[in-house]
Image: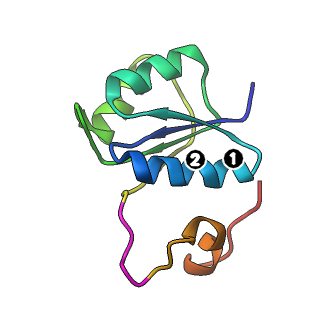
Amino acid sequence: MGRNVLIVESDMDFAIKLGLFFGRKSFSPVFAFSIREAMAELRAQTPVLVCVNPLLRDGTGEDFLKKARAEGFDMPVVSMEGWLPEELPEYLPERLPEYLPGKMQAG
C-alpha cells in the first residue's frame, strides 16, 4: 500500500495547501472535490488517511463516509473545515504543530 492521503475538500485552495503539507511529510496527496470523485479515488487505491470536509459539492462528509463504509472501506478519517481564523499566518501548514493543543506526531 502506498502512502496516499485522500483530501476530500470543496475549497480547491485549501485542498492544495493541505496537499503541500502532506507532500512535505512524504505522503502523496490525492484530491477529490465531491463524493463521486472521492468514491472513484477510493476504488482506485485505498489511502492511509482521508481528510474530509463536512460540506461537499454533492452532499456532506458524513454522506461520503456512510457510502465508503457501506462499500467496505475502513481507513482513518479526519474531519476538517477549510477555513482558518484571520489571526493565523498564511504559512500555517509548516507551523501547524505550534497551533494545535498537544504535540503532533511526525509520520
The residue lying at 52 percent from left, 15 percent from top is 43
Horizontal side of 45 relative to 66 (left or right) equals right
Horizontal side of 85 relative to 72 (left or right) equals left
Identity, as a three-letter code, of the amino acid under mark 1? Gly
Task: Tell me where residue 9 appears, x and y as whole percent.
Answer: 39, 43
Establish if 40 lies above or below 92: above
Task: Tell me where residue 100 appears, x and y as whole percent.
Answer: 56, 76
Establish if 69 lies above or below 105: above
Range of residues picked out in magenta: 83-87
Horizontal side of 17 relative to 12 (left or right) equals right
Which one is in front, 48 or 69? 48
Q: Quadrant of the N terminus?
A: top right
Q: Which mark is residue 101?
A: none
The residue lying at 35 percent from left, 64 percent from top is 83
The residue lying at 60 percent from left, 71 percent from top is 96
Identity, as a three-letter code, of the amino acid under mark 2? Gly
Residues tagged 2 and 1 counted as in contact (Cβ below 8 A): yes
Which one is in front, 86 or 40? 86
The residue lying at 24 percent from left, 36 percent from top is 57
Task: Tell me where residue 30 appears, x and y as whole percent.
Answer: 56, 33
Q: According to the image, label 2 marks what residue?
A: 19
Horizontal side of 61 relative to 44 (left or right) equals left
Q: According to the image, label 1 marks what residue?
A: 23
Which one is in front, 11 or 54? 11
